[in-house]
Amino acid sequence: MALSTLLVIASILFAWFKFKNCRGEGEAKGFGKILRNKWYVDELCDAIVVQPLMALSPFFRWYCREKGIDGTVNGVENW
């Protein structure tokens, strides 16, 4: 356990001295671009979940509200 703690402290110190003057400015390339853009998780979620649901929402609104809720209320009302 002491060895792993020593390695962690050494890694932190190494990273601190290596990157203490880095301001993160400039164009990222390669893997740095992927990391800067948060692994493109937001774009992937938008493409897989949000956009298809937005495209289907008029159908769901029509089917659930018009046929489901309003149809049930009107059916009970006329019964």
Image: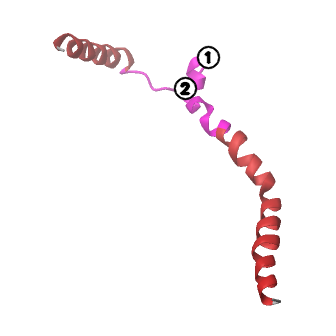
Q: Give the range drawn in magenta.
A: 20-44
* Pointer 2 residue: 35
Answer yes or no: is residue 60 visible: yes
Answer with the quarter of the image where residue 43 lies: top right
Q: Mark 1 points at which residue?
A: 30
Give SS at disc 2: helix
Q: In this view, does 62 lie to the left or right of 6?
A: right
Was residue 68 drawn as part of the magenta stretch in this picture?
A: no
Mark 1: amino acid? Gly
Q: Residue at x 60, y 24 (%)?
A: 33
Identify the residue at horizontal 76%, vertical 47% (top origin).
Answer: 52
Q: Which of 47 and 22 is in front in this view?
A: 47
In x, y percent, where is residue 61?
A: 78, 65
For the N terminus, give its image quadrant.
top left
Which residue is outermost to the bottom?
78
- Dot 2 alpha-carbon crowd within 10 angstroms: few under 14, some 14 to 19, many 20 or more: few
Magenta span includes 34: yes
First of labels 1, 2 by sequence position: 1
